[in-house]
Structure formats: C-alpha cells, structure tokens
Image (spheres, rainbow, N blue to C red):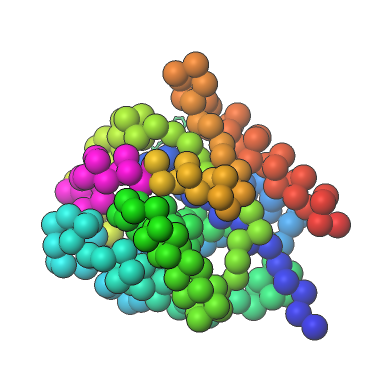
C-alpha cells in the first residue's frame, strides 16, 4: 500500500510573497526534521514549460484574453505532469511533504479569471479539476494558502523585478495587464470559500505585515493540519 504524503500549496497573485513564504516554510520544516521538498511552477528551466513561456511572452497574442483559458491551462498542466513524474512522485508516495509555489490552483485563479459568466466559469473549473487531477492523475492538495494582498500593493513589491524566464525588465502578458491581475485577484477571493483555501491577509491597518509574522501564521496552520491527520 502506498502511504500518501502531503501536498501544501502557496497561492497568490504575482508578487504576493509566494516564493518568500514557500522557502521559509520549507526551511523551518526541514530544520525540525520533517521529510520535505519544494517545487515551483512554472518550471522555466525545463523543456516542458516552452509553451508557457511562448504564451507569457505574447507569441500567441499580446493580451491574456487572446488565448482561451482552456488552451492556456493545458500548457501549465503539461509542465506539472512532467514535474510530478520527474521531481516528486516517489517522494510524495513514500509519505514526504511537498511545498508547491503555485499549482493547479494558479490555473483556477488566473485562467478562470478570464471567464466572467458564472455558469461558464463553473464549467471551466469542473473541467480543469477533471483534467489535472483525474486525466493527468496529479495529487490533490491537502492544504492551499492564498496570500491575500491587494493588487496595488503587490505592484509596488514587483517594481523593478526582472522577468523570471527572460531575465529582462519587460513584464509578461499577465503582469502588464493591471485589469487582468485585478480580475484574477477577485476570482481568487471567490475560490477561497468555494474550495476551503486558507486566506492569509498580508496587510493590517493598510500596512504590509512582516514576512516573519505571515510565516508564523502559515506554520501554525500547517502544524494544526498535521495534528488533525494524526
Ligand atoms: N511581507 C512582506 N513584506 C515586505 N516585502 C515582502 C513581503 N513578502 C514578500 N516581500 C518581497 O516582495 C517581493 C516579491 O516577493 P516574492 O516572494 O518573490 O513573490 P512571488 O513569489 O509571489 O512573486 C520580494 O522582493 C520579497 O522579498
Ligand atoms: C503555474 C501557473 C501560473 N499561471 C500564471 C500566473 C502568473 O501570472 C504567470 C507566471 O507565473 P509566475 O512566474 O510564478 O509569476 P510570479 O512569480 O510573478 O507570481 O503564470 C497560470 O495561469 N497557471 C498556472 O498553472
């Protein structure tokens, strides 16, 4: 019998602190002796992300809306399937804890955000669930955090940041479309309740909370999950 591990996802719009918080959680759990590994999507250094890069570069259109959410989702899912097989399937099936910076949940946020009609959006989300978790057989996350930071604030955090795959200052087609990012953010807030994600408010009294304070909240929620599943 396989002893399934745990898949923990850190989700949030661009520049919300996902990389920072995934790293901190990983380092803390490792230090405490847990069997843990970190993954991050898209895997820009792998061939399986070529279509993702072409899409984000604007090869298929300058605007996110130029590519159907169904088609764009298949690009990202392909990279995740390759990563499951290459990076973590065995580790996860042996009971390891996997911390993911973005996952299928990013398609739920950023691709579903392209669809305004409620019925059509639900249809897409059901299709996506079936596609990534049933057809591709990817693990369903045990815990999803959503780092809640208003788009205006994350724009400040991202200022001057280089594009992750080109290394240049030019932003990708998602990052340069403020209205699209705002729609993705709104979509995410509606998904938090629907899918029982843990919303982590990154602001208090109009100020950004410290990286350390946010980390403590994330860590406590994770430890509680472990206690419950013992
Ligand atoms: N709570 C915070 N307070 C101040 N700066 C932060 C905070 N969280 C993240 N940052 C900074 O904001 C930038 C974007 O964070 P990052 O973790 O790379 O976001 P993401 O992975 O979501 O794109 C980084 O320079 C990071 O150091
Ligand atoms: C992993 C993933 C990302 N995306 C989107 C979110 C981002 O706008 C974009 C690039 O992701 P990423 O480089 O992780 O953005 P950032 O580090 O700035 O947060 O791709 C999806 O639409 N679906 C996915 O499955």
- Among the 4 quarters of the image, the one containing residue 224: top right
Which residue is rendered at x = 17% and y = 55% of the image? 63
Determine which quarter of the picture holds residue 73: bottom left
Task: Look at 64% across and 78% down and name the residue there.
Answer: 90
In this orientation, does residue 136 appear?
yes
Residue at image location 37% in from the left, 61% down from the top: 120
Q: Is residue 213 above or below residue 85?
A: above
**Residue 185 horizontal/vertical position (percent):** 39, 42
* Residue at the extreme front of the image, as rendered: 119
Residue 42 horizontal side relative to residue 205, left or right: left
Front residue (pair 166, 204): 204
Left or right: where does residue 191 sit relative to residue 25?
left
Magenta segment boundaries in residue numbering = 170-185
**Residue at (32, 51) in percent of width and height:** 116
* Vertical side of 196 occupied by 152: above or below: above
Residue 183 lies, in percent from the top left, at: 33, 44
From this viewpoint, which residue is outermost toward the right?
230
Location of ligand 1 given as a quarter of the image: top left
Q: Position of residue 18 (x, y in %)?
A: 47, 46
Residue 45 can be seen in this image: no
């Amino acid at each position: 019998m396989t002893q399934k591990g745990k898949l923990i996802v850190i989700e949030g719009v661009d520049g919300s602190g996902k990389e920072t918080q995934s790293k901190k959680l990983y380092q803390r759990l490792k230090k405490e002796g847990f069997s843990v590994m970190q993954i991050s999507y898209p895997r820009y250094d792998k061939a399986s992300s070529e279509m993702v890069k072409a899409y984000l570069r604007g090869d298929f259109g300058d605007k996110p809306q130029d590519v159907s959410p169904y088609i764009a989702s298949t690009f990202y899912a392909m990279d995740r399937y390759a990563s499951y097989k290459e990076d973590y399937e065995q580790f996860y099936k042996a009971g390891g804890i996997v911390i993911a910076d973005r996952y299928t949940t990013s398609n739920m946020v950023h691709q579903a955000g392209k669809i305004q009609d409620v019925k059509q959006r639900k249809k897409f989300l059901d299709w996506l669930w079936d596609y990534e978790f049933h057809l591709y057989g990817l693990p369903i996350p045990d815990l999803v955090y959503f780092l809640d930071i208003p788009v205006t604030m994350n724009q400040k955090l991202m200022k001057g940041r280089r594009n992750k795959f080109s290394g240049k200052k030019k932003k990708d087609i998602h990052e340069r479309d403020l209205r699209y990012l705002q729609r993705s953010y709104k979509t995410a807030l509606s998904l938090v309740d629907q899918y029982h994600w843990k919303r982590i408010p990154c602001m208090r009294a109009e100020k950004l909370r410290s990286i350390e304070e946010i980390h403590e909240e994330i860590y406590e929620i994770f430890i509680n999950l472990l206690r419950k599943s013992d």
